[in-house]
Image (cartoon, helix red, strand yellow):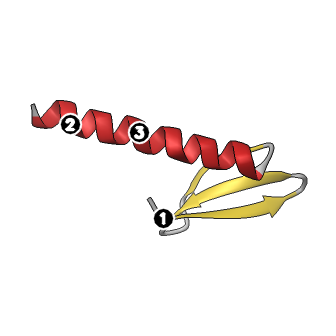
Amino acid sequence: MNVKLSYVNGHIEVFDGVGKFLFSADSHREAMEEVERGLAVTVAAEENQAA
């Protein structure tokens, strides 16, 4: 997933590849963990639909 992280007023805002706001996080690390967790959930859901 292509994301953009922006530091805004003391927190990180995460946007998708087309600029849609996804979520905010307290730190860069937290934002990346959430992105990775979201990717894992998306892949698992896609695998379940294919089965």
Is 12 situated above or below 33? Answer: below
**Residue 7 visible in the current orientation:** yes
Residue pointed to by mark 1: 2
Q: Residue at x 83, y 59 (%)?
A: 8
Of mark 2 and mark 1, the one earlier in the sequence is: 1
Please say if the residues under marks 2 and 1 sit with CB atoms less than 8 Å apart.
no
Secondary element under disc 1, as helix, strand or loop, is loop
Relative side of 23 to 46, left or right: right
Label 1, residues with CA under 10 Å away: few <14, some 14-19, many ≥20: few
What is the CA distance from the residue labelled 1 to the residue labelled 3? 14 Å
**Residue 24 visible in the current orientation:** no
Relative side of 43 to 39, left or right: left
Residue pointed to by mark 2: 47
Residue pointed to by mark 3: 40
* Image depth: mark 1 or mark 3 in front: 3
Q: Position of residue 32 (x, y in %)?
A: 63, 49
Which quadrant of the figure contains the N terminus? bottom left
Q: Residue at x 55, y 47 (%)?
A: 35
Is 24 situated above or below 5? Answer: above
Q: Position of residue 28 (x, y in %)?
A: 74, 52
